[in-house]
Amino acid sequence: MVFVTFTEAEKVKNCLMDEQHKQMTHIINKIYTAFILKKNRTLQSQLRILVGHLRSHFDYEETLMQQTQFEGYYSHKLEHDRFYCKVEGIWQSYVDKNPKLTLEELYNVKSWFFNHIEINDKKCGEHFAKNGIS
């Protein structure tokens, strides 16, 4: 089931970031499908995978921000940290056999993901491109 799509409009001028965002949309779609079909084991597994992808992606982005002295580093990192903790908490609720994911929460994940790309990651992508990183 398609819950989120990654299109040309979401690209941020950084090939690896774009690929990571694309991979995360696939994982979010698998999470959505597992949630709708009530497949908790699949859901837990995909949440674990998403947590791993988020950590790798955020680490990559934050390293580039530090290397290029991106002006909005601290606020951007704070957003990453909050979102990561939220998703990790959802995953942990499945590990603890006390699932906390709701359809509303899935829509919040979707909104955060696309808002973050549009408002913050595109600024980073432009900054990185100006610094010769694409």
Image (tube, rainbow, N blue to C red):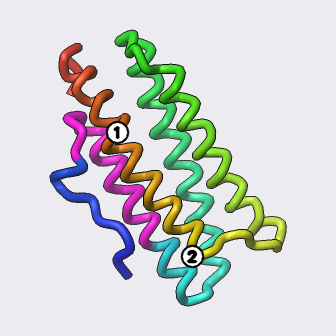
Relative to 119, is 61 above or below?
above
Taking the spot 52% from the left edge, 61% from the top edge, the residue there is 108
Q: Which residue is mark 2?
A: 103
Quarter of the figure that contains the N terminus = bottom left
Q: Secondary structure at mark 2?
A: helix
Indicate the position of residue 58 as horizontal and vertical percent values: 49, 36
**Which residue is label 1 attached to?**
119
* Residue 90 location, quadrant: bottom right
Q: How far separated are the C-alphas under marks 1 and 2?
A: 24 Å
45 or 122, nearer to the observer: 122
Secondary-structure class at tag 1: helix
Query: For the point 58% across and 46% down, which residue is it?
Result: 83
Q: Is residue 12 left or right of residue 102?
A: left
Is residue 18 shown above or below 62?
below
State which tag comes first along the sequence, 1 or 2. Answer: 2
Q: Magenta stretch mostly in which secondary structure?
A: helix
| Magenta span of residues | 11-29
The residue at 60%/74% (across/down) is 43
Lateral position of residue 25 relative to residue 73, left or right: left
